[in-house]
Image (spheres, coloured by chain):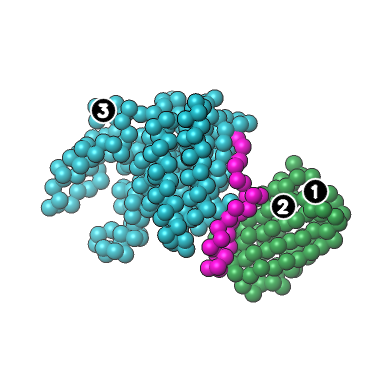
Amino acid sequence: MEQIELTYPAKKKVSQRAHVGVVGSGDLEVLLEPAEGEMATVLIRTSVDGFRDTWKAVLDRFFTKYNGAACIQINDAGATPGNVILRLEQAVEASEQ
Amino acid sequence: MSNQSSEIQFINRQSFIELGARERAIALLDAGTARELVGPFDRVESPWLQMQSVTPQADDGCVVMKGKIGGKAAVVIALEGAFQGGSMGEVSGEKMTAALDLACADNENGIETSAVILLETGGVRLQEANLGLAAIAEIMASILALRKHAPVICLTAGTVGCFGGMALAAGLASYVVMTREARLGMNGPEVIEQENGVDEFDSSDRALIWAIHGGEQRYATDLADALVDDDTEQIADAIRRFVAKGVPPVHRSSRVELYRNRVEALDTSRQWDPKELRTLWTANGSEGEQR
């Protein structure tokens, strides 16, 4: 069990919160909520230890396209990077509906 | 029905099994009436899992959705089979108990409220051991209190099925609805094999497992009240039908003599097969007893 916190500068206001996914094997849950100020925070809790660099690379890449001032919580049960990106994009889509 | 129209029906069918717990609950409630209680953003999650290196889920795998079914007040409680096998922990158990108790209080205050419990569960969450066991005892007490006022309907769609203590809870339900894909039983196949050996029950023999625990057999031996296809509309229809039917005159779990006689009449000196049981324990509906 590892906890990882990351922050990114973000400008865009998030209109509504979104919840997607499930903490099932190889999957993850994303809770995305509007945050105050011009900052996005990501809190990751993962059952697989030792992948901090991979998480940072995935989130760095995600925040090259996403600019929302969001508070994102990820509860992970061993999802692959591809799955993580898809769930994050799904959460963003749901928050913009 | 012509082949063509049944094919079109099959193609247009929306799978219920493929839905998550939240989508399942919404699908059963009248359109636009669903309102989630203690949702994921309330973050009421298990305090015990993280200590054991298991990532918790923000809703602890239990979705409580209030709304209407066929115009009548109802609460749907759905377990998420993909999170920890739908197991019952302290928090998910308490959510279910509280939802059932609130429905009971509504009934006592003159607002008829039925409950639908979506069971995809292996029973007690082993990481929360005694707290999970206590939760199931409370759930059973709450079902018994509520079912006097309004129907408590248990639906097992699959693919996890319903095992362990929650199978006993299903036994207390006013009505049990199953699909062919679902299984219902006290001890899961792996548990039986582990305890009594592969000769007793081969847990890798899927045909055998479904012939005994499967929805079709449970319905044929009168342990389930409806057998439905994996079709969201058909399942929602069945649930609406049972909500409208109201409290049955006699609950299955009160028919002690019937089931005791069935078991006593079995000649245990030889092996019975599931098909024989269907004729012996008379197919659903032909029992002659109106439920």
Label 2: how many residues lie within 10 Å, few (<14), some (14-19) or many (20+)? many
Badge 2 or badge 1: first in the primary sequence? 1
Where is mark 3, residue-wise? Answer: B289
Going by the image, does A19 lie left or right of B123? right
Task: Please tell me how crowded label 3 is: few (under 14), some (14-19), or many (20+) other residues with Cα within 10 Å.
Answer: few
Residue B258 versus residue B288 in the image, above or below: below
Q: Which chain is cyan?
A: B
Dot 3 amino acid type: Glu
Mark 2 and mark 1 residues within 8 Å of each other at the beta carbon: yes
Residue drawn 24% across the image and 30% down it: B287
- Tags 2 and 3 touching, CB below 8 Å: no
The residues tagged by marks 3 and 1 sit, at their Cα atoms, a distance apart of 59 Å
What is the secondary structure assignment of the residue under circle 1? loop
Q: Position of residue B46 (x, y in %)?
A: 55, 58
| Vertical order, A59 against B72 (above or below) | below
Seen at 73% across and 66% down, the residue is A5
The disc label shown at residue A14, or none: 1
The chain under label 3 reads B
The magenta stretch spans residue B35: yes
Percent position of residue B284, x then y? 29, 33
Amino acid carrying label 1: it is Val
Front-most of B98 and A17? B98
Q: Colour of chain A?
A: green
Residue B266 appears in which quarter of the rendering? top left
**Quarter of the image with the N terminus of chain B in it:** top left
Residue A71 lies within the magenta run: no
Q: Residue furthest bottom?
A: A50
Q: Secondary structure at mark 3?
A: loop
Which structural element holds mark 2? strand
| Residue bearing mark 2 | A32
Extent of the magenta region: B34-58
Residue at 66%, 50% in the rendered image: B41
